[in-house]
Image: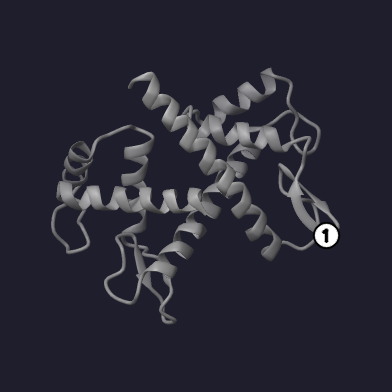
Amino acid sequence: MTNTQSRLISERTRRLISERTRAALKELAKTRTLGRAPFGFKYSEGQLVPDSKTHATLKWILELHYNKRMNPHRITKTLNEYGLKSQTGKEFSWNVVCQIIKRDERLASKEMMKELTKTRTLGRPPFGFTYDCLGQLVPDSKTHATLKWILELHYNKRMNPHRITKMLNEKGLKSQTGKEFSRNVVCEIIKRDERLASKEISQ
């Protein structure tokens, strides 16, 4: 990977983290009652806003995870080596770091579903999703795990569509039509995710 490619990936990751932060504020404001604010945020006049003391640490955790591909154990070790403190004022634990990452992933999944619901009319749902009784797009229990694995192989493992297709078929996983995956199908899944990410950045 060239330095230019690495820089572009880093910039895209930072923009996505910034967009996720705004999404987090909207989502948390709807679902949380006043209590202890999530790490990286605080309450101001009853509204969740970024906490100047911890928000930079939150963004760094997400950047280490998504951009540097660090696992929670390594992130925890790095945070504690720098003397950074958790919400309780103590050292970070593996569980706390995992919770922060999982919360961000849940918000990202919700944003994806919202965007898909806005842009699609009822028809064949995109791979990894299905329609509920109200016509809303929801994760499909049979294929959503495969969708997440495809995106993880592409973004985290840096695999190209050809190699991903080969792995899916070696595992005996099936596409939306019940047949083996083709390179074109895998490319469409990845491109759809990239379009959604691009829309989040441009909004």
Q: Residue 100: horizontal and vertical position, in percent?
A: 62, 43
The local secondary structure at tag 1 comes to loop
Q: Residues within 10 Å of mark 1 (few under 14, many from 20)?
A: few
Of the pair 64 and 174, the residue shown nearer to us: 64
Q: Residue 107: horizontal and vertical position, in percent?
A: 55, 54
Q: Is residue 138 visible?
A: no
Q: Residue 19: horizontal and vertical position, in percent?
A: 56, 48
Q: Residue 25: horizontal and vertical position, in percent?
A: 67, 54
Residue at image point 13% right, 59% down: 179
Residue at image point 39% right, 19% down: 3
Task: Determine whether, in the image, residue 104 is placed left or right of residue 135.
Answer: right
Tell me: residue 49, above or below residue 141. above
Q: Name the residue that disc number 1 marks.
A: 46
The picture quadrant where one finds residue 84 is top right
Q: Amino acid at mark 1?
A: Gly
The picture quadrant where one finds residue 139 is bottom left
| Residue placed furthest toward the right | 45
Task: Determine whether, in the image, residue 197 is placed left or right of residue 191.
Answer: right
Residue at image point 67% right, 58% down: 28
Tell me, what colour scheme is on the image?
A: one colour
Tell me how many marks there are: 1
Q: Quadrant of the N terminus?
A: top left
| Residue placed furthest toward the front | 202
Q: Is residue 160 visible?
A: yes
Residue at image point 74% right, 34% down: 86
Of the pair 154 and 144, the residue shown nearer to us: 154
Task: Determine whether, in the image, residue 27 is placed left or right of residue 6.
Answer: right
